[in-house]
Image (spheres, rainbow, N blue to C red):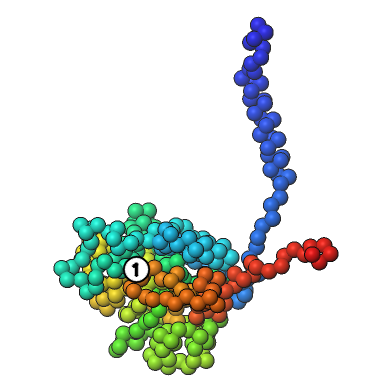
Amino acid sequence: MMASSMFLTPRALGAYAIVVLLFLTVRQLGTTHTTYNTAEWTSGKLSHLTGGAGPRPANATLDFQEIVYISMPYRTDRQDAMALIAAQTGITLNKMIAGVPSADVHEKARPLTAHPKDDPKKPWLGVWRAHADAWRYMIDNNIQSALILEDDVDWDVNVKEVFGLWNWQMKTNNSLAENNGRGKNGQECEYGCDWDHLSIGQCMYKPHPNDKSHFSYNDPNSPAIGTYTKENAKEMMENWNYKSEDAGVRLITPTYHPLCTMGYAMTQRGARRALYQIGGFKAMDNPIDWEFISHMKDGRMRSYTISPPALVKWKVFGPGDTDNDYGHEYKTKDDIDSTQGGGVSKGLLNSARQALKVLDGTFHTWKNGQ
């Protein structure tokens, strides 16, 4: 009898569990955590337009279903930087897609023509495989739209305003699309209902030589044309007659000749078309950006390009600037900062990476000045 009294009855166990639960709940309610708010970073240029049908800042995935980025597993420096600028600007990076060395693409899985235009042992084959893995991730997980980034990208501190305004223009004012971008039944889609691909981070762009169809709008977060790279500024001045000092410009064209894949968006349909057309099912013989160019020129994907680009390259000095080593030689100097913190970008009014400097400084003063 004494031994049995040492055990709690079911009713007693239930009462004990309730008491423990109440204790933990009260303890949790009494706990406060300091939150780090970066709202002061944003300019609020669109804040007065957050109601009604007008433009509003984009959400944490820039109005796409997900944001993914591609990074070689060993580039922890770039991954750290991506985590920092995403956190500081309120962006959610949903997944990292591992970069792929060309040597890891088995010869049986190489989707090459009999005479590829470049040596498949060079990095471009692995670059293609990593991007194809991003498309397949979208397909496997039924992701309806995704922003695909490379890990050396930079964006504006007010990136949500940049993309929110662009999204609104594509949904309501896209004169290049049927129904101004709305669906067949008049429905509204993010960035319009008719696209497969959006070019956002091109390092160089050429519009169609004869068809100059476009529409433009004012973006208060777009800096003067002359602050962009030479290639991006050349496009705007030679093709669209802007001047170096012109600012606040965004221009949308049907995509024709975008070089580089710093950042672009795909729909589910676009991901399927890309994986089918470019190496996943059919042969290819060019680096991925040139494959995109060929397919855009042939009209095999429906795409739009924003110029000047909203996403730009963050350039560091030294061998860490690229993982596409085509025999570049670097001369490291003692007085040059070759880390991510020593990098630069062009074409942003307020670089998110430059703005990380706010995380450094003197935040505590010792007594007696020591």
Answer above or below: position of 12 versus 107: above
Of all residues, the one furthest to the top in this rendering is 1
Using residue 4 as the reference point, say whether residue 271 is left or right of it: left
Element carrying mark 1 = loop
Q: Residues within 10 Å of mark 1 (few under 14, many from 20)?
A: many
Q: Quadrant of residue 304?
A: bottom left
- If the image is split into quadrants, where does the N terminus sit? top right
Q: Nearer the viewer, residue 285 or 221?
A: 285
Q: In this view, does 186 lie above or below 208?
A: above
Residue under label 1, please give it.
196
- Residue 8: x and y in percent read 64, 18
Seen in the picture, residue 16 relative to 206 is either above or below; the reply is: above
Residue found at x 67% / y 32%:
20
Q: Tag 1: residue type? A: Asp
Residue at 37% x, 61% y: name it. Answer: 99
Q: Where is residue 183 in the image (x, y as percent from the top left)?
A: 38, 68
